[in-house]
Image (cartoon, helix red, strand yellow):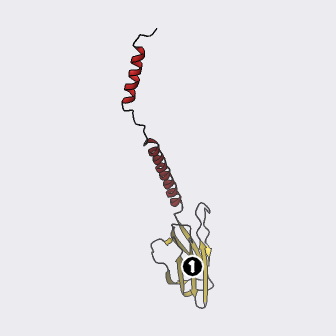
Amino acid sequence: MPAADFRQRVISEALLYQRQPQPETKRWLLPSASAFAALLLMAVAVMFNSQQAADLSWQQNVALVFNAPADIESATIEIRPGQGVLLTGYDEPVIRWQTPLQQGSNRLTLPVSVHSVSNGGLTVTLSYGQSHKEIQIHLDHPAADAKMPARAI
């Protein structure tokens, strides 16, 4: 049988326990954890997008062949890089020069940097006498086409 004052002690302890300040529930824990998880997801997304953007930038050489039916004393070659395309060493939107061409194949290799896929390409124009030829060159990502063939004009 319990002691005579057992009931009184249990009730006194319970009342004393109720009067003491109870530890505050950690209301900040769930919102903080949620905010941290969202921040972590955003960081992963940014790193993933940065990697994709890096994959969309590349450098390559574009080989052109100008076929001249005869020796040409002065031909005009014009290169217009598209949006996101730069001719290495040139910042101008249009590069134009005059040059002689020998009869047959005249090869020109252009080093280009591509920084996006939107309108990524070159427009190449060859003019001499009454002749005027223009081609559009689409620059594919190197993974899509490992070996770029020469383009003939």
Mark 1 burial class by Cα count in 10 Å: few <14, some 14-19, many 20+: some
Residue at x 39% of width, y 17% of height:
9
Could you say which quadrant of the image residue 91 lies in?
bottom left
Residue 88 % position (x, y)? 47, 71
- Relative to the observer, which residue lies in front, 51 or 38? 38
Could you say which quadrant of the image residue 61 lies in?
bottom right
- Left or right, 11 with respect to 109, comes to left
The tally of labels here is 1
Q: Looking at this view, name the residue that lies furthest to the bottom.
A: 130
Residue 16 can be seen in this image: yes
Residue annotated with mark 1: 124
Which amino acid does the dot numbered 1 rest on?
Val
Residue 51 % position (x, y)? 51, 56
Residue 38 % position (x, y)? 49, 50
Residue 17 % position (x, y)? 39, 26
Q: Quadrant of the C terminus?
A: bottom right
Can you say whether 59 is above or below 35 in the image? below
Residue at x 54% of width, y 82% of height:
77
Can you say whether 47 is above or below 63 in the image? above
Q: Looking at this view, name the residue that lies furthest to the top.
A: 1
Residue at x 48% of width, y 78% of height:
93
